[in-house]
Amino acid sequence: MMNNKKAALRMTALAAMLAMGGMTAGCSDDDDGGPAGGGGGGGGGVGGAADLSTPAGAKAAAGTLLVISDLATGIEDGGLVALPGPKAAVNCEDGGTVEDSSANDVNVASPFNKNVNVARTTRVNCKIAESNEAGSVTITQDGVVESGESTTANPLVSYFRLGKGAATATTPYTFSIEQASEQGAGFNGTYGFFYRVDGSEGETGEEQRLVFDMNVKFKVTAPGVPAGQIPQITYQAAFGSTASPFTIKSNNAGVELNGSYGASISTPQGNADTGCSNGSVKVTTKTVLTPAVEQVSPFSAGELELESGGKKAKIVFVGDKIRVTPPGGTEVEFTGTELQQAGSACAGLALSGLLLAGALGQ
């Protein structure tokens, strides 16, 4: 399991992106594929092109990067991924089972070519239910979470995985939330995640390669409103793929972000007016990014290029301001707070549901 120092290093790298069953020793899952050379195919990916043609569209695409980063970071920091000491399978409080295990010197198909010591938790239809005079909440979790770290440094290699990866597909870690109040209001959501991060920390710098694939379906109920009149909402978000992970590199010169990301949301009104960029975007670091200190914008200098549907937008960091130029358009300047607000418009409900489940699942 990762020590606190490595976890902090990984979270620092992810924070930089806010601008935009049983196991045997020496063996790994035979269905698992590691990013960039360890497997390939499957995992990640959102279809369609995001609209970068206007400053608002380019800002939404950059803000969407912020939201997906928050979602991925929340998964690793939240109660869903807690890995206690090894123990045999036991019954969960309200049904299902949970089992913890560990193994040393495991080949997890790391792109950094080192084995790791691994801790794993497997949940099978594991339920937690709470109720009081105001209503009830039930959370059901199903899937595998693992983390590990190499025993030697230079580089120190780390690994984290939620769900299972295969050569052509991924099996998500899932949880569902059912919430009902005495007044008749309710929330019913199903969340599926595949998330894998491989890290390397050496004397010359750090590198993380990540794959994130999230699919959400949720529906609300309201007192006095027939169930059929409130449609289901769906949300998908992704970073990279098992064949081509999103990469984060940092050293004394600064930070580089490269790879694909995307989001898509479907609401009762469609997706045109949600504020979400709704499509796949490729981000490329054109000028190395300088991490900022004590400001909302995470970078004080550097340039990113966003590309989608054959169009390119430019994102330039200058002090605590962010300058966005759509293809063939005029540069517009935003604050870090405004960029955060653009991302929040994309997936506020999905993020709220994740935070609710993480808090209740601890």
Image (cartoon, grey):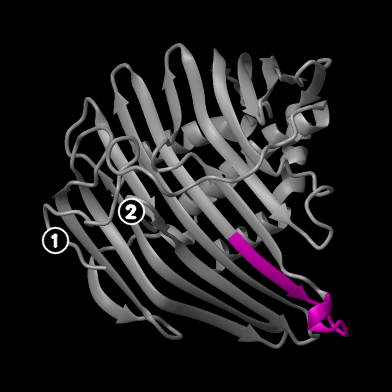
Give the residue at the far right of this rendering: 224
Relative to 170, say whether 109 is above or below. above
What residue is at 53 percent from the left and 45 percent from the top? 45
Question: Which label sits in the foreground, 1 or 2?
Answer: 2
Relative to 151, say whether 21 is above or below. below
What residue is at 24 percent from the left and 43 percent from the top? 109
Residue wearing tag 2: 166
Q: Position of residue 305 (x, y in %)?
A: 62, 20
Q: Position of residue 122 (x, y in %)?
A: 33, 68
Q: Secondary structure at mark 1?
A: loop
Assess disc 2: are there few (<14), some (14-19) or many (≥20) residues with their C-alpha within 10 Å of its C-alpha: many
Residue 3 part of the magenta-drawn span: no
Q: Which residues are magenta?
A: 216-229
Q: Amino acid at mark 1?
A: Thr
What residue is at 49 percent from the left and 16 percent from the top? 254
Q: Return the mark for residue 24.
A: 1
Relative to 177, say whether 48 is above or below. above
